[in-house]
Image (tube, rainbow, N blue to C red):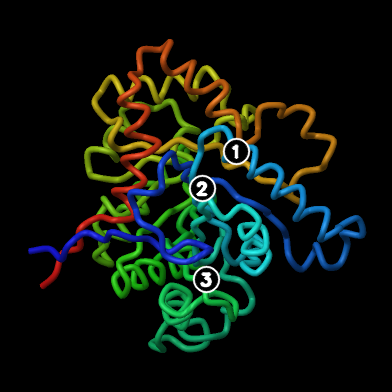
Amino acid sequence: MTQPARTTVESVLGPVPLDSLGTTLMHEHVFVLTADSQNQWARDWDEDARVADAVRRLTELRDSGVRTIADPTVDGLGRDVARIRRINEQIPDFTILVATGVYTYADVPGYWSARGPGAMEGLPEPMVDAFVADITQGIQGTDVKASFLKCAIDHHGLTKGVERVLRAVGDAHLATDVPVMVHTHPGSQTGTEVARVLGEVGVAPERVLLAHSGDSTDADHLSGLAEQGFILGMDRFGLDITSPFEERVGIVAELCRRGFAGSMVLSQDASCHIDWVQPDLFAFLPNWNYLHIGKDVIPALLESGVTKEQIEQMLVDVPRQWFGAQRPVA
């Protein structure tokens, strides 16, 4: 038995119809900042200039035909929803969907380390209530509500901190039914750990997006995850230092040939500004920007035998279905 599928999704500017999302890039940041370090060392930060640059870049993206981005910036990535709303208000016909959660590869952030089960075994997990409040009430004192959950597991594996966050995200999903995005490291096949832990919590695979799956060319491993129902994030186009363009195109084309276009989304994991990267290194990443999918990736996929219908599935249908899936009820 299921409840009716959702018809709207929460965005930075309020609820919007799912049918209005249009072409959606499912993993793009506006800013990625190391908040504490940024406050200590970034003497060149100019708030007004950065906001104006973000408005320019996102307007250019909108004008290219993209209607929506999902921004998975959470605790650990410098989330500032008031800043994002200031930007989005200047592009009101462009939709930004934001997330709640914690991004860590190892330990929980210090704020959470001695709270709840971090302080004493058996205490309830306070992260769950915090995530649920972001989804149901608003983020950082605003009325902007999160439309999905985000956490991470990288090559470090399932550390105690990573598992604690993953389970908290799973419990928050069960309380709200908003979907879950997990940063993964497919070279270490960490998606299998996500499947196990979230399966124990009771999260359906169809509600989970395994980000950065496109970093791998292991079609059998990725097919196995898709067969279980997981959504594969082919979302780092342009980040050619982790996987060359031809390999990223090739694995998407191969999975389409295997019938999994309905299990993938496309994106770039780009941003207007990221302080994790030394600025002069961007010269070696000329394609890591919001426009790469439209300008280069789609033509290459078409040349590889992917159909226009399959591309629309990945850019329009799968995102809409992920945010609006029917919900099982007891």
Residue at 66% x, 27% y: name it.
287
114 relative position to 42: left or right: left
Marks 3/1: CA distance? 22 Å
Determine which quarter of the picture holds residue 75: bottom right
Q: In this view of the protein, which residue sits in the foreground, 175 or 191?
A: 175
Q: In this view of the protein, which residue sits in the foreground, 10 or 31?
A: 10
Q: Position of residue 194 (x, y in %)?
A: 36, 54
Residue matched to label 2: 69
Q: In this view of the protein, which residue sits in the foreground, 171 or 57?
A: 57
Q: Position of residue 247 (x, y in %)?
A: 50, 20
Q: Position of residue 267 (x, y in %)?
A: 50, 37
Q: Position of residue 248 (x, y in %)?
A: 49, 25
* Quarter the C terminus occupies: bottom left
Residue matched to label 3: 144
* Quarter the N terminus occupies: bottom left
Question: Disc 2 marks which amino acid?
Answer: Ile
Relative to 14, say whether 59 is above or below: above
Residue matched to label 1: 61
How many other residues sit within 10 Å of disc 1, few (<14), some (14-19) or many (≥20)?
some
Q: Are marks 2 and 1 in contact (CB under 8 Å)?
A: yes
Q: Secondary structure at mark 2?
A: strand
State which tag comes first along the sequence, 2 or 1: 1
Marks 2/1: CA distance? 10 Å
90 relative position to 224: left or right: right
